[in-house]
Image: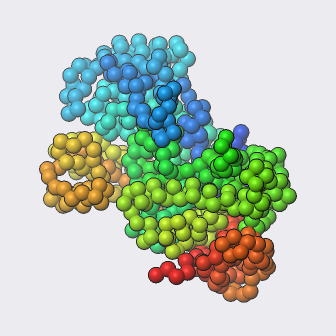
């Protein structure tokens, strides 16, 4: 039997999990190398392999923030946008919204468009929303645009002609002509043929923007893995939680923008609890997602970049991407988040992060600004379990806050801890309370390097009485990659298609061909709306029109809180195609628990229990049950059990925290 490797590259750490026939064999956590992410990957992979022959690795699954960072840092390729004559201004005009701090700014400057106005080109053609050709395509206009694009030295082009989802012939011909002159061309009908012109255009543009970068990166990754003896296929996680080949990920690069966060949610869903809130706190950000009935919530439009609004991304402040993604809320709060004082002298935490270089002050790598990790070390919550940490350097950094605030060092550190808890609670609030979901009926699944340290504090704010910390929680996203099946999504907009079976069959065949598999499982769904309305909701497919209407009415009431019925129409047809032969990841072996006494005690600061206390410190191996305040730690994570909570060993090596007095 072979081995599988999961690799998750984050803003601060690169996590690697090696899984064999019996489950997780080894894990590794090392600092990310931003100048060359592959160098950090190879360090982690080599460390995880140990004495295992690299030739025994049969599968590598990767989650990467490469696409996200390229969009945020604007380091992608220069893109030419080609569209129908009369519509070249659609992308430069875009859509704009102001978040709270910009609302009354008289000097507000909208973000730059994803393509410069001068790089937008028009061709002569026109197709109606029903697919009728109103103006035939003029190939000469395409060739003139292609020649000008090549003359400017632009190497990537995005083609999005009006209503090409209804009739793609013009768009395919345009792309073919452009490919004679431009190295990298992406057509919307090949990426995501769905209604809404602006969103379809930006989705296509972003695929052209990051495609060349992703192609080069994945090619180099395969070469450097081969150099250390790993010739296994490389798979990449898509934003919606599916896993695809590196070749398909390069062709459909836009589908990998939320690759990294998706893997952690799959790990939370794998705990076996039906209704959970996934809580992932890493070094740079914290993310939350609702899992109901064992299935993560999926959104069919998200925004990358832009500005936050109470834990979410405000539509109109970033670039809309119209591909499936696990529905996450994200805030700039992590272990590396920097604590600072604003001009009024108030304490703030994040969103700026120390990252992996120079990192928190306690890493001893040259960082001097106080971070959440420094504060947690000062409070006694952390030790040097996974890497050397300098308590004197952390204390020196926190003193930079304590002095101006006029408080003690531990009071300043605890304030940082509480403020970051409040910031992360905003993400949980977005995916629950703002959507009409009562979080008290859910368990909080905490993971990420810093998540278990803060989970109880976040949970208590919502009255959540159960926190689950799975085994290998510090590298849970990397472990979640191995739980992902080889699968991909397809969509096609057809207003009340005459033969839905034909549409579904074509979509499934196209997806199966891209996956390169014969036996597949197909999940069908459809976007439904009230006739006369412009927005739709996705429901599982049913052949009966009455059953579809019933499902839509129920979904409408759930989302909007309004019971309404009326005539419906079907807008877009969707499939998720999964390889029926994808091997399931072996179960994570339970960490044995002896139920023995705590291995040691440590001084930690819990002001609600009187301040500095000698608290028991357990490992997962020694934990049976303990009443807080206490600490449970292992090689890659630390769990803080505050006063009023109990911790106990759970199934499969998990640790369960329960709030005392909860019903």
Left or right, 544 with respect to 508, comes to left
Above-or-below relation of 443 to 526: below
Figure label count = 0
> Front-most of 643 and 201?
643
- Residue 465 can be seen in this image: yes
> Front-most of 560 and 401?
401
Q: x, y percentage for residue 536?
A: 27, 47
Q: Residue furthest right?
A: 392
The structure residue drawn at horizontal position 25% and vertical position 41%, both measured from the top left corner, is: 534
The structure residue drawn at horizontal position 14% and vertical position 50%, both measured from the top left corner, is: 567
Q: x, y percentage for residue 73?
A: 60, 35
The structure residue drawn at horizontal position 70% and vertical position 65%, both measured from the top left corner, is: 636
Q: x, y percentage for residue 118?
A: 47, 16
Give the colouring mode of the picture: rainbow
Q: Quadrant of residue 178 in the image? A: top left
Left or right, 560 with respect to 329, comes to left
Left or right, 66 with respect to 295, comes to right
The N terminus: image quadrant = bottom right
Q: x, y percentage for residue 114?
A: 48, 29
Q: Quadrant of residue 409 in the image? A: bottom right
- Residue 473 can be seen in this image: no
Q: Quadrant of residue 374 in the image? A: bottom right
The structure residue drawn at horizontal position 62% and vertical position 64%, both measured from the top left corner, is: 454
> Front-most of 252 and 562?
562
């Amino acid at each position: 039997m072979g081995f599988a490797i999961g690799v998750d590259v984050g803003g601060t750490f690169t996590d690697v999990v090696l899984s064999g026939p019996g489950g997780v064999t080894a894990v590794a956590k090392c600092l990310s190398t931003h100048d060359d992410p592959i160098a950090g990957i190879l360090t982690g992979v080599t460390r995880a392999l140990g004495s295992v022959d690299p030739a025994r690795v049969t599968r590598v699954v990767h989650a990467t923030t490469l696409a996200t960072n390229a969009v945020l840092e604007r380091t992608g390729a220069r893109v030419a946008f080609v569209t129908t004559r009369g519509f070249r201004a659609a992308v430069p005009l875009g859509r704009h919204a102001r978040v709270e701090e910009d609302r009354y700014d008289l000097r507000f400057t909208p973000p730059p468009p994803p393509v410069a106005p001068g790089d937008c080109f028009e061709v002569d053609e026109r197709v109606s929303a029903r697919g009728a050709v109103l103006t035939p395509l003029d190939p000469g206009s395409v060739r003139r645009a292609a020649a000008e694009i090549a003359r400017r030295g632009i190497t990537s082009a995005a083609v999005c002609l009006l209503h090409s989802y209804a009739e793609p012939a013009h768009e395919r011909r345009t792309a073919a002509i452009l490919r004679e002159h431009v190295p990298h061309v992406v057509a919307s009908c090949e990426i995501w043929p769905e209604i809404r012109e602006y969103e379809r255009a930006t989705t296509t543009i972003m695929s052209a923007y990051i495609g060349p970068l992703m192609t080069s990166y994945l090619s180099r990754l395969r070469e450097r893995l081969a150099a250390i003896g790993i010739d296994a296929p490389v798979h990449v996680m898509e934003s919606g939680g599916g896993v695809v080949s590196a070749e398909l990920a390069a062709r459909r690069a836009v589908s990998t923008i939320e690759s990294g966060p998706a893997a952690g949610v799959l790990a939370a869903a794998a705990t076996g609890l039906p209704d959970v809130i996934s809580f992932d706190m890493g070094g740079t950000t914290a993310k939350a997602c609702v899992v109901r009935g064992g299935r993560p919530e999926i959104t069919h439009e998200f925004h990358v970049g832009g500005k936050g609004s109470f834990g979410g991304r405000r539509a109109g402040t970033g670039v809309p991407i119209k591909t499936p993604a696990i529905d996450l809320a994200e805030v700039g709060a992590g272990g590396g988040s920097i604590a600072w004082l604003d001009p009024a002298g108030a304490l703030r935490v994040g969103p700026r992060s120390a990252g992996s270089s120079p990192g928190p002050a306690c890493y001893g790598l040259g960082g001097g600004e106080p971070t959440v990790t420094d504060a947690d070390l000062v409070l006694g919550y952390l030790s040097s379990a996974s890497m050397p940490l300098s308590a004197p350097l952390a204390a020196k950094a926190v003193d930079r806050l304590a002095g101006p605030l006029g408080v003690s060092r531990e009071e300043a550190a605890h304030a940082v801890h509480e403020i970051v808890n409040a910031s992360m609670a905003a993400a949980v609030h977005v995916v629950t309370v703002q959507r009409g979901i009562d979080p008290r009926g859910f368990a909080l699944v905490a993971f990420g390097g810093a998540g278990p340290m803060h989970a109880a504090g976040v949970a208590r704010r919502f009255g959540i009485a159960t926190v689950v910390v799975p085994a290998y929680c510090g590298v849970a996203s990397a472990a979640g990659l191995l739980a992902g099946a080889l699968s991909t999504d397809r969509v096609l907009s057809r207003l009340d298609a005459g033969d839905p079976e034909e549409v579904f069959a074509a979509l499934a065949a196209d997806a199966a061909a891209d996956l390169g598999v014969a036996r597949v499982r197909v999940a069908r769904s459809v976007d439904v709306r009230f006739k006369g309305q412009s927005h739709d909701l996705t429901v599982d497919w049913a052949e009966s029109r009455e059953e579809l209407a019933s499902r839509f009415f129920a979904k409408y009431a759930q989302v909007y809180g309004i019971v309404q019925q009326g005539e419906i129409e079907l807008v877009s047809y969707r499939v998720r195609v999964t390889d029926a032969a994808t091997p399931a990841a072996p179960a994570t072996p339970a960490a044995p628990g002896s139920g023995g006494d705590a291995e040691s005690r440590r001084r930690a600061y819990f002001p609600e229990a009187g301040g500095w206390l000698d608290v028991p410190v357990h490992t997962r191996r020694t934990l049976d049950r303990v009443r807080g305040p206490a600490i449970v730690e292992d090689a890659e994570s630390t769990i803080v059990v505050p006063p009023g909570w109990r911790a106990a060993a759970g199934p499969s090596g998990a640790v369960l925290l329960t709030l005392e007095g909860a019903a």
